[in-house]
Amino acid sequence: MKTHDEMVRDWMQDPVFVREYNALEQEFTLFDELLRARKEAGLTQAEVAERMDTQPSVVARLESGGGSQKHSPSVATLQKYAQAVGCRLEIKMIHIPS
């Protein structure tokens, strides 16, 4: 069985996959940041959920991108998550040169 990295490496040979993957880069970055912050805090999803006063399944969906009923998390939800893992939420607007 291939690892996740091996599968992605194979998929990256497909130009259609690369275009779609790149379009989702910001979302992937957000989910990576959520996981990194939780792991650095040494917390499980259940512990984060308890601190957020929600269910572990909500945290799992948040970290995985929403599942089948995908939607973007609210700023309030991201703030609650950040607080639960001992972080402060920071949102930046980066100017894109034309």
Image (tube, helix red, strand yellow):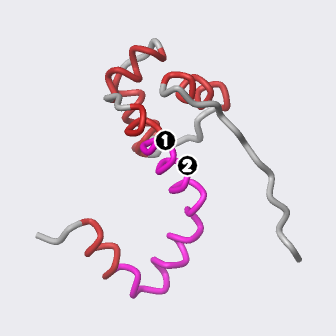
Distance (Cα) linking label 2 and label 1: 6 Å
Q: Residue at x 83, y 68 (%)?
A: 96
Q: Mark 1 and mark 2 in contact (Cβ < 8 Å)?
A: yes
SS label for mark 1: helix
Q: Quadrant of residue 3?
A: bottom left
Q: Which residue is mark 1?
A: 34
Q: Residue at x 86, y 74 (%)?
A: 97
Q: Quadrant of residue 17?
A: bottom left
Q: Residues within 10 Å of mark 2 (few under 14, many from 20)?
A: some
Answer whether residue 2 is magenta in the image: no
Reply above or below: 92 against 19: above
- For the N terminus, the image quarter is bottom left
Q: Quadrant of residue 25?
A: bottom right
Q: Residues within 10 Å of mark 1 (few under 14, many from 20)?
A: some
* Chief SS of the magenta region: helix
In the rendered image, residue 76, in percent from the top left (x then y), is placed at 65, 25
Reply above or below: 44 against 28: above
In the rendered image, residue 40, in percent from the top left (x then y), is placed at 41, 38
Q: Nearer the viewer, residue 26 or 35?
A: 35
Reply above or below: 66 against 93: above
Q: Residue at x 42, y 43 (%)?
A: 35
Q: Residue at x 85, y 63 (%)?
A: 95
- For the C terminus, the image quarter is bottom right
Q: Which residue is mark 2?
A: 30
Looking at the rendering, the stretch of residues picked out in magenta corresponds to: 11-36
Q: Amino acid at mark 1?
A: Leu
